[in-house]
Image (cartoon, rainbow, N blue to C red):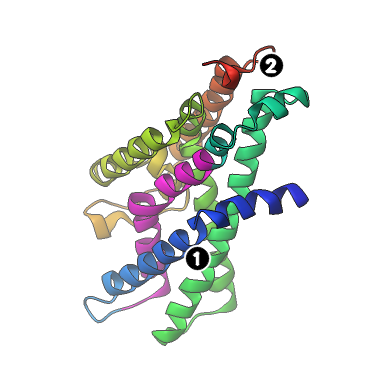
Amino acid sequence: MMYLLAEFQKIKRNNTIFIVIVATFFINLMSVFQTNYDGKFSLREYADVLLWNHSCFLYPVMITLICGYLIDLEYKNNTLKNIYLAAINSRTLICAKLFVGFCFILIIAILEFVCSTIGVICCHIEVFGESVVYFLVQQIVFAVCSFISVLPIIISGAQKENGYLFGSLVAAFLEICGIFLAPRGLCGYYAITAGLEILNFNGEMVGGTLFSGNQGEVTLAITLGLSVLLLYILCPKNRNYMLEK
């Protein structure tokens, strides 16, 4: 717990939390306007719009930036030598940073749920308790899916200082690609948007059909397996690659 708090303090010192909160607020606000453009508004429609905006504009880049920044701090603070002397290898270090990033994205998902609930209340939408619980579960599940989808990018970018910046650009590019690929029946085959299929996203709003099936789970499982493989190949236990110049 103390380690998690220490890592969160590092994020706070870089104003990352403030940027994430502002981005979360604007994504919710944009989703409200997108859903209510025709005078009709339902919780289901709002949830679908919010998921789409997360997939295309927020989560992949945000997760890559946060996790990559936490790893990159060890370069900038010149603490890698001390970590190596403490018998902590690079693989363990990256896993620890990924765990912190995972906890952070779960907190953001809960914050997103709070913002969404406030938006629903302000728009006078009548919802039932079961709907609210499902809304919360939906937010968390999609955050986890988005985290898995960018793991290979984060691990690859951790091999050198500032590598996460290029990784963030790659994540942004993949987000844009998802806008065009998802409505064409490739949602479940594309890691960035696979979470939409898992949650049965209503694709009519983007010119597609209802995204449903089992391909999303398979795609994320393959992505997770690829991430583990990259971790073992790029971060061997018998070598601290971070100390190499």
Mark 2 vs mark 1: give the one in front.
2
Residue type, numbered disc 2: Lys
Front position in the image: 213 or 65: 65
Question: Disc 2 and disc 1: Cα gap in Å?
Answer: 37 Å
- Magenta stretch secondary structure, dominant: helix
Residue 43 included in the magenta stretch of the image = yes
Which of the two residues, 30 or 132, is positioned nearer the viewer here? Answer: 30
**Is label 2 in contact with label 1 (beta carbons under 8 Å)?**
no
Residue 190 in view in this figure: no
Q: Secondary structure at mark 2?
A: loop
Q: Position of residue 104 (x, y in %)?
A: 59, 53
- For disc 2, the marked residue is 237
The quarter holding residue 171 reads top left
What residue is drawn where x is 46% and y is 38%?
A: 149
For the point 59% across and 69% down, the residue is 133
- Give coordinates of residue 94: x percent, y percent: 62, 31
Tag 1: amino acid: Glu
Q: Which mark is residue 138?
A: none
Query: Disc 1 designates what residue?
Result: 112
Instruction: Tell me if residue 133 comes above or below residue 139 in the rendering.
Output: below
Residue at the image position 38 percent from the left and 50 percent from the top: 55
* Region of the chain picked out in magenta, as a range: 41-69
Q: How many marks?
A: 2
Name which residue lies at 39% across and 84% down: 123
239 w.r.t. 32: above or below: above
Quadrant of the image occupied by residue 216: top left
Mark 1 residue element: helix
Please identify the quarter of the rendering in which residue 241 is found: top right
Residue 113 drawn at (x, y percent): 52, 68
Q: Is residue 164 visible?
A: yes
Report the side of 173 relative to 94 (left or right).
left
